[in-house]
Image (cartoon, grey):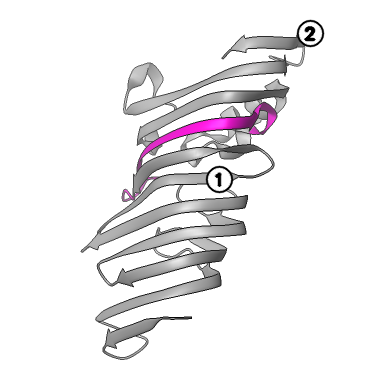
Amino acid sequence: RNGAAEWKGDIDAMSRYSVKTEFRGLAVAAHDGMPGASNLAGTLDANDRDGRLHIETQAATFTLPKLFADPIAFDTLRGDVAWQRDGNESQLQFKDVAFANGDAAGTTTGSWRPRAGGFGDVDIRAQLSRVNISSTHRYLPLGAGQGVKDWLRHALVKGTSSDAKLTLAGDLAQFPFAAGKGGQFVFAAKTQDATLQYAEAWPPITEIVGDV
């Protein structure tokens, strides 16, 4: 609604285009390494070279096939996203994005750049005001490997945090950046009532309160 669009060439093979609109219930399929989403509301100003998206929506889902194995659902989502394309190069940026779902709530700023044959380069900073520690495995990037995700799923039995920070920066193909090689991954949280099951043969450590 309240939109305008222009293009050059056949509709199925446009050489240039531009679109500016307000929208509700928008769905965009993931394509050519770029993310997809469903049930978005906000404003869009885009062309064949770059674009800007302001999101203010509820019950939205994002698909990021180069970053995460499964779609990520949000109860509420508000913020700004921008992207640029220059030949075969592209970049996605997001700023002051506030989000909440059943697992976490907070704000994040960052960028993602696709990398041929890999998962891409990221630079993400997040401040979390609510975290369900046992859900951590759901938000690990693909580069973490299935073994790490499985261990976190079983080891972090329960726990919450009302003050957590996340930094993820570098080439995701080298995650989790052993000895700092290829990037940086830092997750710091003040936990309450946490339970850790380090290994099946070990007794669980319960009622943990402290900094992780």
Question: In the image as oriented, which residue stretches furthest toward the front?
Answer: 2
Residue at left 43%, top 65%?
31
Quadrant showing the C terminus: top right
Residue at left 40%, top 62%?
53
Q: Which residues are magenta?
A: 114-135
Q: Quadrant of residue 201?
A: top right
**Vertical order, 93 against 190 (above or below):** below
Residue at left 69%, top 21%?
155
Residue at left 36%, top 75%?
20
Relative horizontal placement of residue 66, taking residue 8 as reference (left or right):
right
**Vertical order, 41 against 195 (above or below):** below
Please give the residue where the numbered disc 1 appears in the rendered image.
99
Dots 2, 1 in contact, CB < 8 A? no
Relative horizontal placement of residue 49, taking residue 61 as reference (left or right):
left
Nearer the camera: disc 2 or disc 1: 1
Q: Nearer the viewer, residue 183 or 73?
A: 73
Q: Position of residue 35 (x, y in %)?
A: 45, 58
Q: Amino acid at mark 2?
A: Pro
Determine which of the numbered discs, if any, sits on residue 203 in the image.
Answer: 2
